[in-house]
Amino acid sequence: MKKYNVVIVGGGSHRNPDLMAMLADNKDRFPIRRICLYDTESERQEIMGKYGEILMREYYPELEEFTYTTDPDVAFKDVDFALMQIRAGRLPMREKDEKIPLSHGCVGQETCGAGGFAYGLRSVPDIIELVKMIRKHSPEAWILNYSNPAAIVAEATKRVFPDDHRILNICDMPIAIMDQYANILKCSRKDFEPRYFGLNHFGWFTHIYDKKTGEDLEPKIKELILSGEDLFKLSGVDEHTMEPSWIETYKFMANILRDYPEYLPNTYLKYYLYPKHVVETSDPNYTRANEVMDGKEKRCYEMMEEVIKLGKLKGTEYEIKPGRGVHASYIVDLACAIINNTNEIFLIITKNKGVIPNVDENMMVEVACRVGSNGVEPLALDPIPTFYKGMMENQYAYEKLTVDGLFERDKTKLLQALALNRTVTDTDTAKAILDDLIEANKDYWGKYFK
């Protein structure tokens, strides 16, 4: 049986304990010879690496090699899969992405609106450089890229690597939403076969099919969401296990569905369709970035440091429980579909090329695709209604202009992008936000626009 070499790019990410545990838990489906963590921040990654050594020793003793490095020549040599999530500027820059727009009365969110714009401009140069380095050492590696903001990243990688069908841009948010649907129906997300269209963080489920019976479960899901019952009571999920911002986001889905009942919405549409509500209910001094820094990331690193002191996971309160993390399971399932040629359905960001017949064929759409050893095969859709077409075309113009502005060093195009974004729209506001973002990002893309 072939064993694969895997590199995790962004080796210090607080998501990696779940990802490493998932790789160990799925060793029969996805046999691995070598796992390497790669990051540019050695001190941060070293904690993850030492934790990973313990995890792999106890849960994946068959693994031949586990290592971590800041040397790309070591990390990317003879790789079969590069699992890539980076955050240029990390959470302190995310905090600025969120707070600067809010200071101007606009949505402050990591991937949506002006915050996502700034984050995308930071992400793109690093991701392009990483792909080039991976291709230098491993021309045939599958690159599973889940770096945010995925829509802007996908638009940029499409242009720089137009013929590279082994770069798959993915997002776990629709999968997390399907987990909520499954909780409501008391089943598993893997019982579903979805149909979906849109752009990343900007889409709609048209159908949720039961794999066994073929029944479309979407009408039943809509009815339950609109029933007036609390979403988390319906699903049996303890909302105390979730951050407050995510609780509000999931509960708001019913509001979107009442106003736009045709399809089940991605939760992120809240930011584009109800920006006034979002701003009014946001704390400009304590945003989602603060929640993560004070919560999930802090707890993750405290946990790893304690495990390193103990020298073990098994027999401690930190013992690995199977099946942790939507994010991790989606990545492993996708890799398994590729190596086993299963042709399962996944939601992938891919070039339209007529999949949605009445929108731009160059648009990077997020749609249901069959995935196997030859890559992705998008499933064609009928023409979409005018409202959704208009929403997508406006959002794609914003994404395209953002990448144009970066590649061409054209500040006017960056202003046009922000003015088009539904969370901003006003030109004077867009100018003020852009100037503040340029100053905040002077060590990144801002240096090109002084």
Image (cartoon, helix red, strand yellow):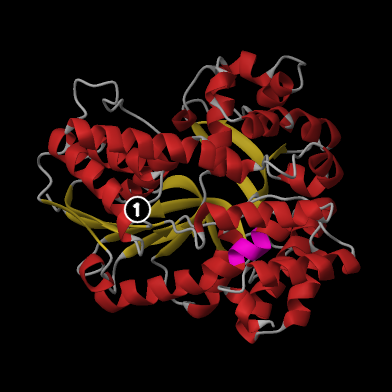
Q: Nearer the viewer, residue 201 or 276?
A: 276
Q: Residue at x 20, y 68 (%)?
A: 78
Q: Please state the extent of the stretch shown in magenta in the rendering.
A: 116-120
Q: Residue at x 35, y 30 (%)?
A: 323
Task: Please identify the quadrant where the C terminus is shown.
Answer: bottom right
Per the image, label 1 sits on a secondary structure element best described as helix
Q: Residue at x 27, y 42 (%)?
A: 23
Above or below residue 387? Residue 180 is above
The image position of residue 361, as x and y in percent, is 65, 70
Q: Is residue 293 left or right of residue 197?
A: left
Which residue bears the numbered disc 1? Answer: 44
The amino acid type, in three-letter code, at marker 1 is: Arg
Q: Nearer the viewer, residue 118 or 20?
A: 118
Q: Is residue 374 visible?
A: no
Q: Is residue 83 visible?
A: yes
Q: Is residue 35 magenta?
A: no
Q: Main secondary structure of the magenta part?
A: helix
Q: Residue at x 38, y 66 (%)?
A: 166
> How many marks on residues?
1
Q: Quadrant of residue 277?
A: top right
Q: Quadrant of residue 206?
A: top right
Q: Residues within 10 Å of mark 1 (few under 14, many from 20)?
A: some
Q: Is residue 13 left or right of residue 217?
A: left
Q: Quadrant of residue 438?
A: bottom right
